[in-house]
Amino acid sequence: MSMTEKGKFEVQKKKLQGICDEHNLIFKFRKDKYPIYLSIKPTNELTGQMSLLASDEDESYISQDAELIFSYKNGDLDICTKGTSFRIKESLIGKLKNLFKSMHFLWLQYFNREVLENELLSADKLPYISDEVSDSDAPDIDEDFEEVAADVEKIEDFDDDEDDEDGED
């Protein structure tokens, strides 16, 4: 039997807790209002402060008033910082960002399953997005295709030139 979205979410949450513990951080995953967000802050423990100061040599420093916030707004990932200084390695930001993306997705899946399977909302109260694409929302496929076709022609021309130089026809 495969794990449910809720179980997968809990696994990701434990991974996040492990990373936060390792780097003297705490997190809050806020899912009860829009937008869903993940907030990362330094711990207020003295040991955390000492290790952060010691790691300043690695160009990593997080002031006590700092906060890193990941959220999705209008379908786009938004990452912002608050406070005095939140300097951490790009690799750590990448791990946190990927965990947030995974947790966000799993939470939405879990929420959707719970609402639909338990009929928590009547059908007339469920959000509706039309399956039809209006002209204003549709991407300009012809323009994109023309750009790709031009690039393919350039590559084909390049390949032809290369064959001529090698003396192969």
Image: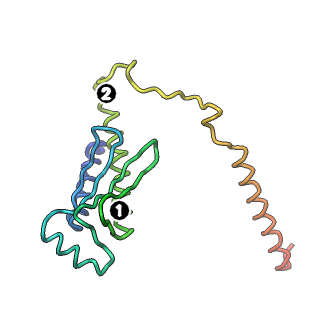
The residue singled out by tag 1 in the image is: 95
* Amino acid type shown at disc 2: Glu
In the image: residue 139, left or right of residue 57? right
Residue 95, placed above or below residue 142: below
Nearer to the camera, 67 or 121: 67
Residue drawn at (72%, 44%) of the image: 142
In the image: residue 5, left or right of residue 143? left
Residue 36, placed above or below residue 58: above
Residue 46 is situated, as x and y percent measured from the top left of the image, at 12, 69
In the image: residue 89, left or right of residue 167? left
Scheme by which the image is coloured: rainbow
The residue singled out by tag 2 in the image is: 117
Residue drawn at (31%, 27%) of the image: 117
In the image: residue 162, left or right of residue 1? right
Quadrant location, the N terminus: top left
> What label does residue 86 carry, if any?
none
Residue 61 is situated, as x and y percent measured from the top left of the image, at 28, 71
Where on the picture, by quarter, is residue 41?
A: bottom left
Q: Do we see residue 1 in this rendering?
A: no
Q: Circle 2 — which element? A: helix
Q: Do we see residue 72 in this rendering?
A: yes
Residue 127 is situated, as x and y percent measured from the top left of the image, at 42, 27
* Amino acid type shown at disc 1: Lys
Residue 83 is situated, as x and y percent measured from the top left of the image, at 30, 60
Crowding around mark 1 (Cα neighbors within 10 Å: few <14, some 14 to 19, many 20+) is: some
Choose the circle earlier in sequence order: 1 or 2. Answer: 1
